[in-house]
Every structure is written in structure tokens, then in C-alpha cells.
Amino acid sequence: MEKPREWLREKSIAKKVLTESNLILEVVDARIPIETKNKVVEDLVIERNKSLIVVLNKVDLVPREFIEKASSLIEKDFPVVPFSAHRKFGGNELLSKIREIAKERGILKVGVLGYPNVGKSSVINLLKGKKVATTSPKPGMTRGEVLVKLEEGIFLLDTPGIITLEYPENLALKCAWIPEKLQLPVEVSSKLLDKIYQERPQAIKETYRVEPEEDPLITLEKIAKKLNYKAKGGELDLERTAKKVLWDWIKGFIKAYWI
Ligand SMILES: Nc1nc2c(ncn2[C@@H]2O[C@H](COP(=O)(O)OP(=O)(O)OP(=O)(O)O)[C@@H](O)[C@H]2O)c(=O)[nH]1
Ligand SMILES: [Mg+2]
């Protein structure tokens, strides 16, 4: 497999942000909270005696019971704030937690870390109450670091996503890789459909109006037929369908979630 060149900068970004910040907001995707937690970042936080709050973002995409299940699991290690940048939910709770730590630590620089596309920039915009950071469904939107003054003595640092030594195939499943940049989108999409089939098969039916199959490739074919995605010769265009499924997952159109 091709090694992404993004690897080169990953650990150094995490280390640099950690050196500069006394509090880290680790933003995770509430649909896949454990998969989007980053052990490398968390270990560095503990090693360097910094504070960390896990922001469980996009809770608008999962049911309440799932939020509770995920929160109680993560809370064993770090404080958690359920959050939805879209629904403007969780901002006050997160602000008061940040201010508490600011009281203890003096001037606070808050590094916002997490996988690409989990909503780091959106979280900053909600905290600030206006659009100060650029957001996009396209993973890898934020390129350099952006410093935002939240209020007197508290600064937020927006960062590009941290991916720490993972292959694009794996990152795509976490909504953290652009589907067009994948070498084998059909394989990755099949893996995603397989996981959804195991965890919440009705999500496939709800999104595409097809009955999901145990064999994800057959499900993908059914979706291609339903969407009428055909290649030149008239056969089904599975590659295009695979990318569409991956984009639908990125955009939150497929209602699946798992621990
Ligand atoms: N459903 C839902 N979508 C969200 C939420 N917050 C952010 N998004 C969407 O997720 C996508 C990524 O948001 P960004 O804020 O750009 O994420 P980021 O982590 O800064 O992304 P990079 O800069 O690419 O690493 C955008 O399409 C947002 O609209 C949320 O609370 N709920
Ligand atoms: Mg961003």
C-alpha cells in the first residue's frame, strides 16, 4: 500500500501543538467515537501533564442512548462533552469547562486536535459565536494552524487533522480521507458496507432503499442499480457507486454508528 506523505508531518504537528497548548480539545466523531480517538495524542498529553477534554461532536447523528454509552466509556479516562456544532449544542458546557481550567492554569492556549473532518473548525466557530475558521465536508480543509482569541486570556488553536501512521484505506472508513484519492474505492466501500451491515443494516435500507446483503459487493451492486450508475458499456459503475457511498458516509447521510 502507498504510504501517505501526510505521515511525515503528523507526529510533529501533534507535538508542536502540545508544546504550545496547556489544554487539548480532542474532537471525535460521535458516530465512531472510539475509532476517531487518537492514542498517540492522548499518551502525549499524559506524558506532558496537560489537560484534555474529549468533544463528542456530531451527536445530532446518533441516538441519545448511544451518546450515553460512548460518554461513559470515554469518561473513564477523560472528561467528555457531547456536542453538536450543527445544532449549536454543548457550547456552554464546553466553555465553562475551558474557563475552569483557565482559572487554574492562567493564560490558556487551547489546541484543537482530532482526525480530519471530525468538526474541529466547526467546534471553534460555535465556541466563538461566529465563523472564524473555515469548514468543509472535504477532509483536510484546514491546512496550517489558525489562532483565534476566544476571550481575555483564552486562545484557541485550530489545526489540520492528525492521522498518525494510518493507511488511506483505514482513514476513509473514518471519514478522514477524500474518496477520490483512494486507489481501491470499491474495496474500501465494501468494507464500510460490511461494517454497517453488522452494526446497523437498516441504515443501508433507509439511505438507498435496497435490502442489504451479507456480501457487501452484492449490496454495492444493488445500490449502483438503484442509482442507475452505469459505465460506458452499460455495466454497473461500481467505482462511482463506491465513492458515492463513501461521500454519503462522510456527509452523515447514512445513519450508522458503533463503539
Ligand atoms: N452532522 C454534523 N456535521 C458536522 C458537525 N460539525 C461539523 N460537521 C460537518 O463536518 C464537516 C467537517 O467539519 P470541519 O469543521 O471542517 O471539520 P475539521 O475537523 O475542521 O476538518 P479538517 O480541517 O478537514 O481537518 C463539515 O461538513 C461540517 O459541516 C455536527 O455537529 N454535526
Ligand atoms: Mg478544519
Image: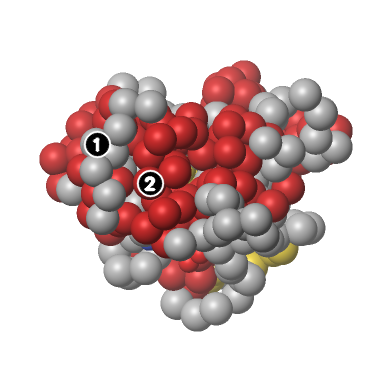
Residue 96 versus residue 256 in the image, above or below: below
Check the picture and name the quadrant holding the C terminus: top left
Disc 1 element: loop
**Residue at (70% x, 42% y) in the render:** 182
Instruction: Please state which of residues 202 and 12 is positioned toward the viewer in this rendering.
Output: 202
Determine if residue 109 is in view.
no
Residue 71 versus residue 120 in the image, above or below: above
- Queried on whether the Cβ of the residue with tag 2 lies below 8 angstroms from ligand 1, the answer reads no
How many marks do you count on the picture?
2
The residue identified by callout 2 is 222
**Residue at (38% x, 27% y) in the render:** 215
Q: Residues within 10 Å of mark 1 (few under 14, many from 20)?
A: some
Q: Is residue 132 left or right of residue 246?
A: right
Instruction: Please state which of residues 126 and 58 is positioned toward the viewer in this rendering.
Output: 58
The residue identified by callout 1 is 200
Determine if residue 204 is in view.
yes
Q: Amino acid at mark 2?
A: Lys
- Queried on whether the Cβ of the residue with tag 1 lies below 8 angstroms from ligand 1, the answer reads no
- Choose top left, top right, bottom left or bottom right for residue 32: top left
Mark drawn on residue 49: none
